[in-house]
Amino acid sequence: MIALTGHSRLRGKWLQGVMSGIIGANNQFGVDFNHPDDKLQGLIVSIYDIGCAVGSLGSFAIGDRVGRKAMILTGGSTMIVGTAILASSTTLAQLLIGRIVTGIGNGFNSSNIPAYQAELCDASKRGMLLSAQGTVTILGLCIAYWLDFAFSYIGGPIQWRFPIAFQAFFAICLVLQTLSLPETPRYLILKGQPAKASQVLSQLNDVDLGHHKVLHLRAQIETAVEAESAGGPFRYSELFEGGKLQNFRRICIACMVNVMQQFTGANMINYYAPTVYEKTMGLSRTMSLILGGCTSLTYLVGSIIPLWAMDRFGRRTLMMASASGLCLCFSLVAILLSLDTRPTAYAATGFIFLFFIFFGFGWLPIPWFYPSEITTTRIRSKGQAIASFINWMCVFTVVQITPIAISNINWRVFIIWAVLCFFWVIITYIFFPETTGLELEDIDHLFEKGGITGGVLTSKGGRTVRSHQHEMNVGLDDDKELGKGQNKEEEVEEGTVEKIEFTG
């Protein structure tokens, strides 16, 4: 499962890293496409994000009908087609179409893979497993940066065609691996396929179909889905409802966390690291490429930290610590660059490196999976798709304005990001609940305390609900010893599994 999500995220960040290395330089790519100016550079880079946003909207429309697995397969296949168009581009129009098609495929995956992984993970390890996709993402960025640097010494179109074409390898691996994986048990129960759900739960826990753990987990999911579906078939208006489930609040938080991620300033460096080093710090193109590659290695180190820290310290703590560090780093970068000397420019570079340590353990991984943790099973697919759409539109905005901002206000752009990161600390503390250690069924009870903040501000550590709260609410907590006389045993006949009934 880690390999599946890793290949998708690695491929997405690969293209981001490749474009960072080839855009805005006096190289073969510039020659082949008539040396695009700042505005056209922004369009070439950011049109990919429009494709991702379109893919997210497509997932919103059909994701629940076709399932998590089918959408991931569709996304991987679309990325393969897009890569072929990109790598064979001879005109600007073809290049832009390739970027859009590839983006659509990545939009499908960014809308479904976080939900797919969240619905298959054990609650105690979910933070680590979901953070792993961020680590593999940055590994792709590292490889892409250094491949760009190596191929910058090679003449001819292969200088940029090969780095772009190589991403197809990861998309092919994604498709082949997905074929052997199951659909999630929560989606299967949502669609009225409990027998298949039991089979998946049995495989995930490596126990027999009639084992008490399988029965217990299935009962949790069924009771949660039943409560969520009490109003009948899904209606889009549910996404705007308050009430006990607070769906609208969940959607708002899912969107907001993605807006905040993109307006930390990280993608200004991700997409344009060499350009930022060259134009705002006065370094040579070669040195800028080297520093861009080294930045990505520092980023990789930062992304490894949440593998250990996410389930120990929680989402809120890491997001607030991360945003505080980002604010400090960009504030110091602005101060140092304002002095306009070579030594202070090098010192500012050091804080850019430190910036990615802070970003890597907080705002890199969490916004991608947090929407899947705070939305209920019934609206998870749509909530993740909306959040993904908002994320990619924000990326588009940031990538569009970055070359223009750098050209017009230079180092002062870092002040804007520093101020925004300061506000992200406050917003996280007030409105974002802690989800660490909670089963996805507990998430249904996340905002039952009500109020402006949904109980987040008045709950210690933002923990508005206890672990296993759903079990206690529906009476399953007294039935831990399923299979020992506390339940009617599940009947398994010719591949069907009857609905579980509990007594006591």
Image: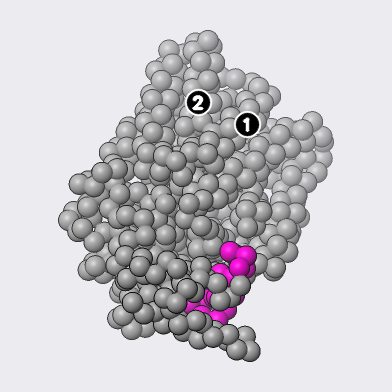
Distance from the alpha carbon under mark 1 to that under mark 2: 11 Å
Q: Amino acid at mark 2?
A: Leu
Disc 2 packing (10 Å; few <14; some 14–19; many ≥20) = many
Residue placed furthest toward the front? 485
- Residue 446 occupies which quadrant of the picture? bottom left
Q: Nearer the viewer, residue 3 or 274?
A: 3
In the image, taking residue 386 as reference, residue 26 lies left or right, namely right
Residue placed furthest toward the bottom? 494
- Residue depicted at x 45% and y 68%: 481
Where is residue 87 shown, x and y percent of the image?
74, 53
Q: Nearer the viewer, residue 25 or 461?
A: 461
Is 312 above or below relative to 345?
A: below
Residue placed furthest toward the left? 451
Where is residue 220 shown, x and y percent of the image?
41, 70
Q: State the SS at label 1.
A: helix
Pointer 2 residue: 354
The boundaries of the magenta stretch are 188-207
